[in-house]
């Protein structure tokens, strides 16, 4: 077993850290306050080669693995979890194409991403989030393709997306075997995107509803066979959950950095906060959970890159990292005292941003269901 990163991995990690410090962190508070994603950051990250890293080289990507993706993701999310999340959504939308796309589909749509397009992964619906098999968007067979009717909700980057990976029912009576995935261009007739949803945190990452009103999708835009959508979504999650676990690792590291700096200078009863064992122990525990979340995340990514099954490791990493991030953010607010409650200091944003880690990409309860199922 070896715990050292390669020289190339250390290089890309350093690049992502510098980028987050220089380009993301200084814009985070304003982007959060305005609820707007700073597109300039996206273009700069793209130019530097920090995005689309998992696309193959012949399509304009870097052909890198999940390990590099989590290293970059952790660094970007240390700068701001909202901006970092929005920057990483292309990696989620690319996965179904990498797993199930034909050569032509990959060339067209992954090529678009490499050229700077953004895309979204659209699974959740108003009546079905955790219950993936319960989605109601219908894909009706018609000559030459399908007609899609229904709507998706909470779709990250939807207002900026040039295409969507959409999961719909091609057979309403076949349960999870009735789902099929499609690639749908944002300019398709009948497709519309709602206004960004108002939310607690990650305000710089826009999420919106997407409506499909009898949208024609040609056969050439179906991903995989009819009925393969559920299993495709589950394969995508095995690959994307290490990345989402890295969102949490970046946030925990930021909580530790901010808490340490504050506890070193704030005095109470004749000594710094760090001089009070109750606070020092909190910081020690934060470091322990950071280390554990990071190692679990790297393990899930490493197994994936090595071609080994990683379902349980991806769920464990995502669950642990999300819960540890929420815990660390809560502790950070407490260490900052009333300044933790103030919008002038970073703690309250970390707290607001952290919560959704326990909700998206499979809630903490769903991760526990998967882990329990894998035990049997
Ligand atoms: C900011 C944000 C961004 C998002 N981005 C995307 C995106 O890009 N694409 C996308 O498709 N979706 C996205 N989502 C949706 C997200 O994946 C869902 O919110 C999530 O899957 C949970 O679904 P739900 O909200 O419908 O909750 P529900 O499924 O209604 O669950 C409600 C509660 O019940 C629990 N629960 C439900 N079923 C079970 C069960 N079987 N066992 C135990 N507990 C259970 C859940 O854990 C949860 O606590 C996003 C959500 C948010 C908030």
Image (tube, rainbow, N blue to C red):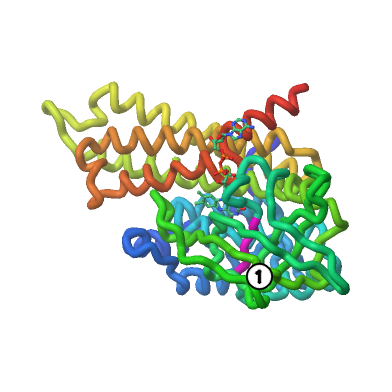
Q: Is residue 23 above or below residue 79?
A: below
Picture coordinates of residue 355, whole percent (x, y)? 44, 41
For this view, does 312 lie left or right of residue 206?
A: right
Question: Ligand 1 falls in which quarter?
Answer: top right
Considering the image in quadrants, where does the N terminus appear?
top right
Disc 1, SS: strand
State whether label 1 is within 8 Å of ligand 1.
no
Picture coordinates of residue 137, whole percent (x, y)? 69, 56
Out of 157 and 310, give the one closest to the viewer. 157
The residue tagged 1 is 163
Classed neighbour count for the residue bearing mark 1: other residues with Cα under 10 Å, few (<14), some (14–19), many (≥20):
many
Residue displayed at 38% across by 38% down: 329
Picture coordinates of residue 362, whole percent (x, y)? 61, 41
Q: Is residue 99 above or below residue 112?
A: above
Picture coordinates of residue 136, whole percent (x, y)? 69, 52
Residue displayed at 63% across by 42% down: 4
Number of callouts in the render?
Answer: 1
Question: Which segment is the magenta one?
Answer: 118-122
Residue 120 in magenta stretch: yes
Out of 289 and 235, give the one closest to the viewer. 235
Residue displayed at 16% across by 29% down: 271
Q: Residue furthest left?
A: 270
Residue displayed at 73% across by 49% down: 233
Out of 193 and 172, give the one closest to the viewer. 172
Residue 209 in magenta stretch: no
Helix, strand or loop: magenta stretch: strand
Q: Quadrant of residue 272?
A: top left
Out of 212 and 309, give the one closest to the viewer. 212
């Amino acid at each position: 077993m070896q715990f050292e990163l390669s020289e190339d991995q250390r290089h890309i990690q350093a690049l992502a850290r510098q980028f987050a410090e220089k380009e993301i962190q200084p814009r985070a508070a304003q982007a959060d306050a305005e609820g707007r994603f700073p597109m300039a950051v996206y273009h700069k990250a793209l130019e530097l080669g920090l995005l689309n890293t998992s696309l193959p080289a012949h399509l304009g990507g870097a052909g890198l693995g999940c390990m590099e993706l989590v290293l970059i993701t952790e660094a970007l999310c240390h700068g701001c979890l909202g901006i970092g999340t929005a920057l990483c959504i292309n990696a989620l939308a690319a996965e179904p194409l990498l797993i199930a796309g034909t050569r032509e589909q990959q060339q067209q749509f992954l090529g678009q991403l490499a050229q700077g397009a953004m895309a979204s992964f659209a699974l959740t619906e108003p009546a079905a989030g955790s219950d993936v098999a319960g989605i109601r968007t219908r894909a009706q067979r018609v000559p030459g393709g399908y007609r899609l009717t229904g709507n998706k909700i909470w779709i990250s980057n939807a207002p900026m997306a040039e295409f969507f990976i959409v999961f719909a029912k091609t057979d309403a009576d076949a349960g999870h075997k009735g789902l099929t995935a499609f690639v749908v261009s944002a300019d398709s007739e009948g497709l519309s995107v709602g206004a960004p949803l108002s939310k607690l945190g990650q305000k710089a990452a826009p999420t919106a509803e997407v409506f499909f009103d009898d949208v024609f999708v040609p056969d050439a835009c179906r991903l995989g066979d009819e009925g393969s959508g559920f299993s495709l979504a589950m394969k995508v999650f095995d690959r994307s959950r290490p990345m989402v676990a890295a969102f949490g690792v970046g946030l925990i590291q930021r909580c530790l950095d901010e808490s340490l700096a504050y506890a070193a200078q704030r005095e109470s009863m004749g000594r710094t906060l760090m001089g009070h064992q109750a606070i020092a122990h909190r910081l020690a525990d934060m470091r322990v959970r950071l280390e554990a979340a990071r190692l679990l995340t790297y393990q899930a990514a490493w197994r994936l890159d090595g071609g080994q099954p990683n379902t349980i490791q991806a769920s464990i990493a995502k669950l642990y990292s999300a819960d540890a991030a929420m815990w660390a953010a809560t502790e950070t607010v407490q260490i900052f005292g009333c300044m933790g409650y103030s919008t002038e200091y970073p703690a309250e944003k970390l707290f607001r941003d952290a919560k959704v880690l326990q909700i998206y990409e499979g809630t903490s309860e769903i991760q526990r269901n998967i882990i329990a199922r894998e035990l049997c």
